[in-house]
Image (cartoon, rainbow, N blue to C red):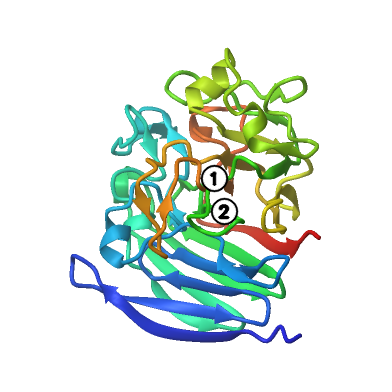
Amino acid sequence: MSFKVEVTKAHYGVDKNGSAIDIYTLHNDVLTLRSITYGARVTCIEAADRNGYADNVVLGYPDLPTYEADKSYFGALVGRYANRLAKGQFTLNGTTYQVPTNNGDNALHGGTDSFAQRVWSAQPIDNGVEMTLVSPSGDMGFPGQLTVRCRYTLVGSAFRCDIFATTDADTVVNLTNHSYFNLSGEGNGTIMGNHVTLAAERFVPVNDAQIPTGELRAVAETPFDFRTPRIVGQRIDTAGDVQLELGGGYDHSFVLNGPAGELKLAGTAVDPQSGRTLTVETTQPGVHFYTGNSLTGNTQGSNGKVIERRGGLCMETQHFPDSPNQPAFPSTALRPDEQFHETTVFTFGIEA
């Protein structure tokens, strides 16, 4: 089996502003990954099941106009601040900044015009593609010009995502890839039967606006205990659990075991139906586990099949929501003499 990666580029479409969008295909004997320069989105990852049948295991759309209308961030590189900022505000160096709100009173994934809606420049690199975006100072209210590079590479049976960022003034940054995984294949039912583990002793409870309370709560004896494999659907609708009711299911960050900055286990998912497995490792301090609770159940995927509610799960490796407003959380501040660099590795396998 050869792990040599072929990288090809093709025209994908023209967005509503007249910008040409390209699609890059990365292929070796184990995986095929496709990514477009609109939102640096991963649109397809093909992996084999236990019978050797390769299928796309991430959620996507059939064409560019549908991606432009997307509200679920399928496959996108989200930022400047992934997840929620309370009331779209944060204070840095004594100055309060306002980000346009797009999630009730909160700013979600960077505000009304996030990196998911931007056109990235791109170039092929060894084993993959590197995409770059320059966000000017004041963009969505954030201070400092931020230059972001994300590298998508294939390493054997793994998809590796490296994200880099630098700034010319103090700012806050939280960046992640927002792919939804369905290991049975896109549009092939829900993820309710997946067996999931999360390498976390604590999770981040939220209030009724889905903003962290500041507590880091033990998962023991709660429906949030995924320290050993649990079936997603087994406890997702537990009556009377306030946190599950607030999220409409799992939509919470988990505090990963081990130090931030070192590659460590975030979680695993196993699909008994196909035999496909997914192992996620990251240098980030947390993983946001989301079970597609807000998917409407009438979305058409890239293959024409309908994506059901809870038809994909996310393991978004990142810092915690609202960290700039939570002094006890790890800092998301980035200074001009620093470089943001986080790595996440998604490894695919087969369980007999």
Q: Is residue 213 visible?
A: no
Of tags 1 and 2, the one toward the viewer is 1
x and y percent of residue 23 in the render?
Answer: 40, 76
Tell me the crowding category of disc 1: few under 14, some 14 to 19, or many 20 or more residues within 10 angstroms, Cα based.
many
Residue beneath disc 2: 182
Q: Is residue 230 visible?
A: yes
> What's under tag 2, amino acid-wise?
Asn
Which quadrant of the figure has residue 29? bottom right
Q: Are marks 1 and 2 in contact (CB under 8 Å)?
A: yes
Q: Quadrant of the N terminus?
A: bottom right
Figure quadrant of the C terminus: bottom right
SS state under label 1: loop
Closer to the camera, 287 or 293?
Answer: 293
Nearest the viewer among 133 and 108 is 108
- Residue drawn at point x = 56 percent, y = 23 percent: 244
Res 190 label: 1
Q: Position of residue 56 (x, y in %)?
A: 54, 65
Residue at 40% x, 64% y: name it. 302
**x and y percentages locating residue 35 in the rendered image:** 46, 70
Q: Residue at x 54, y 72 (%)?
A: 33
**Which of these two is toward me, 328 or 249?**
249
Q: Residue furthest top?
A: 240
Quadrant of residue 134 within the rendered picture = bottom left
Query: Which amino acid type is shown beneath numbered disc 1?
Result: Thr
Q: Which mark is residue 8?
A: none
Relative horizontal placement of residue 127, taking residue 210 as reference (left or right)? right
Disc 2 residue crowd, few under 14, some 14–19, many 20+, Cα 10 Å = many
Q: In the image, 231: left or right of 141?
A: right
Q: Earlier in the sequence, mark 1 or mark 2?
A: 2
Residue 186 screen position, x and y as percent: 50, 58
Q: How many marks?
A: 2
